[in-house]
Image (cartoon, rainbow, N blue to C red):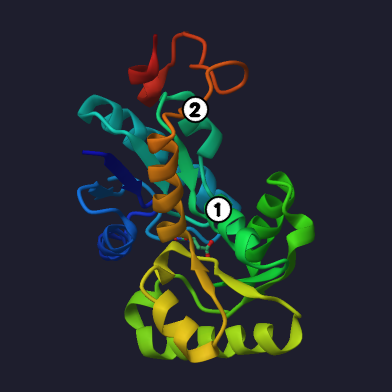
Amino acid sequence: TMRIRIINANTSAAMTDKMGVAALNAARPGTEIIAVNPASGPITIESHFDETIAAVGVCEEIRAGEAAGTDAYVIACFGDPGLYAARELTNAPVIGIAEAAFHVASLIATRFSVVTTLSRTSIMAERLLHEYGMGNRCRKVRAAEIPVLALEHEADASYRLIEAECIRARDEDQIGAIVLGCGGMADLATRLSASIGLPVVEGVAAAVALAESLVTLKLQTSKFGDLAAPPAKPFTGEFARYSR
Ligand SMILES: O=C(O)C[C@H]1NC(=O)NC1=O
């Protein structure tokens, strides 16, 4: 059976569990889902600094996954933190939930909008859209203006704010689909889609489906060029464990 490691890049265990449930719901029968988060790092990722620190934890979880045996990895944070570094550390496919959601949305609609948490993190989604060559497919990156942890602690109020932003996107942006811009929204896609009458693409589910497809196609991360294993060298201080 296929083993997929879902890496929540923040250290909020309740969010990790929620992502694990979303991944299991999306996975084929028989696919094994292991949902984890780093022991060290930010409890949520809401800034460039949070993202930089979280990327180290993502790499740690890839190393743990390699030791345990993993067929594919999902980076379950909408900034796709550490994506390319993670791809250097394994032969397995590594899928970020933003990249996955953008691709899946572009297969069912000519244009989509993103609804994320804080407007300050919308710059990350905008950067990724252009990085992934999807800038012309996304009409707007919107924010419900809620902290990521509100998805846990004020779930009802947060849902209503996200729903209202999705309705504005549907009515104003001339789009065919919505992309949810936070791993912490992994449990909201079905309810939102039914409520607003538009396909809602959620990144954890999209990434799991794409990861299974790549494994089925026997396609792995290419080791020719910039995703080859990092050059061996000494590391100092707390990163001495990375020395090769
Ligand atoms: O960038 C965001 O707003 C969402 C991002 N932060 C986080 O802790 N998990 C995420 O998916």
What SS does tag 1 mark? loop
Q: Is residue 244 left or right of residue 116?
A: left
Q: CA distance from mark 1 to mark 2?
A: 20 Å
Query: Foreground residue, 121 or 177?
Result: 177
Identified by mark 2, the residue type is: Thr
**Residue pictured at 24% horizontal, 25% vertical:** 67
Residue at horizontal 54 percent and vertical 76 percent from the top: 199
Residue that numbered label 1 is attached to: 79
* Mark 1 in CB contact with mark 2 (< 8 angstroms): no
Q: How many residues crowd around disc 2 within 10 Å: few (fewer than 14), some, or many (20 or more)?
A: some
Nearer to us of marks 1 and 2 is 2
The disc at residue 221 is 2
Q: Is residue 57 visible?
A: no
Seen at 62% across and 73% down, the residue is 177
Residue type, label 1: Gly
Determine the residue located farthest toward the front in the rendered image: 217
Q: Position of residue 109 (x, y in %)?
A: 66, 68
Which element type, helix, strand or loop, lies under badge 2?
A: loop
Residue 114 rendering spot, x and y as whole percentages? 62, 69
Q: Is residue 193 visible?
A: yes
Along the horizontal axis of the image, is 96 left or right of 137?
A: left
Neighbor class of circle 1 (other Cα within 10 Å; few <14, some 14-19, many 20+) is many
- Corner quadrant of residue 191: bottom left
- 54 sits left or right of 143 in the view: left
Q: Residue at x 38, y 40 (%)?
A: 73
Does the residue tagged 1 have its C-beta within 8 Å of any atom of ligand 1? yes
